[in-house]
Image (tube, rainbow, N blue to C red):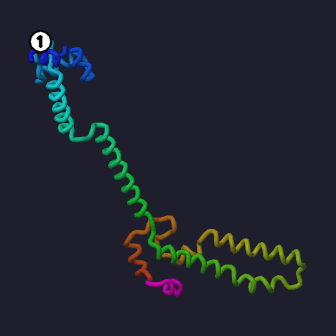
């Protein structure tokens, strides 16, 4: 029996090799409570059981995630929070759809008012002119009308005061402009 016990005992170097650490770390483990059969000799099975329990306690104390994982989670949360703030800012700068549709409708109306009457206005001036001169005058009139439309002055005069396409529309502006139309037909009729 004593021979069997002697075979189970190993020196500090062998235990350090089993634990994949230095002999100095083994001495630190002994100071922390690792069993030792006698000076410089260790029961391999008892030491492995002790080391297994120690590792389990270390893992439990760490909270199951490493510092790196904890930091990665923190960075992910911060990034998500930042994206939510940016999205909130974007949403705040958008105008309501019904207001955009009204704005587009006003642009179409301005184009219609500027282009449709041109033929009646220009026709009397074109009588008796040759083909090249008619073409030149038509181009001049249409370019002038398109230039005026490009400024948007006709549309801005009709739009809600203080609401240009590039501006933010506050709830107060929307309320003072009137209620949201219920249907597209109502938008068209306005």
Q: For the N terminus, which image quadrant?
A: top left
Q: Compared with residue 12, is residue 103 higher up or lower down, i.e. above or below?
A: below
Residue beneath the point at 33% across and 42% down: 72
Q: Nearer the viewer, residue 112 or 55?
A: 55
Is residue 3 left or right of 175 when viewed as pictured?
left
| Magenta span | 182-189
The residue that disc 1 covers is 39
Quadrant of the image occupied by residue 35: top left
Q: At x 11% / y 12%, what residue is drawn? A: 39
Residue in view at x 51 percent, y 86 percent: 185
Q: Main secondary structure of the magenta part?
A: helix
Rendered image quadrant of residue 63: top left
Q: Position of residue 170 (x, y in %)?
A: 40, 69
**Relative vertical location of residue 30 with respect to residue 143 in this rendering, above or below:** above
On the image, which quarter does residue 87 sit in? bottom left
Residue 108 in magenta stretch: no
Q: Image height check: is 112 above or below 165? A: below
Left or right of 132: which side holds 105?
Answer: left
- Residue 124 lies, in percent from the top left, at 80, 86
Q: Secondary structure at mark 1?
A: loop
Q: How many marks?
A: 1
Q: Nearer the viewer, residue 42 or 156?
A: 42
Front position in the image: 145 or 67:
67
Apparent side of residue 101 relative to residue 110 in the rendered image (left or right): left
Residue 104 visible from this viewpoint: yes
> Residue 152 appears at what percent x and percent y?
59, 71
Please tell me which residue is depicted at 16% across the width and 17% down the height of the picture. 9
């Amino acid at each position: 029996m004593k021979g069997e016990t002697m075979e189970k005992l190993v020196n500090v170097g062998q235990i350090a090799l089993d634990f994949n650490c230095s002999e100095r770390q083994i001495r630190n483990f002994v100071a922390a409570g690792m069993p030792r059969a006698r000076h410089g000799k260790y029961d391999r099975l008892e030491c492995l059981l002790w080391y297994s329990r120690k590792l389990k306690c270390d893992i439990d104390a760490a909270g199951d995630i490493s510092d790196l994982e904890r930091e990665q989670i923190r960075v992910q949360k911060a990034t998500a929070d930042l994206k939510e703030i940016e999205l909130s800012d974007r949403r705040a700068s958008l105008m309501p759809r019904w207001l955009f549709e009204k704005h587009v409708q006003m642009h179409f109306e301005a184009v219609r008012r500027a282009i449709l009457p041109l033929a009646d206005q220009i026709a009397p001036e074109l009588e008796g002119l040759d083909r090249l001169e008619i073409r030149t005058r038509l181009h001049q009139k249409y370019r002038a009308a398109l230039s005026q439309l490009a400024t948007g002055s006709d549309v801005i005069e009709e739009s809600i005061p203080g609401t240009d396409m590039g501006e933010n529309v506050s709830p107060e502006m929307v309320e003072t402009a009137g209620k949201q139309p219920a249907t597209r037909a109502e938008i068209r009729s306005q």
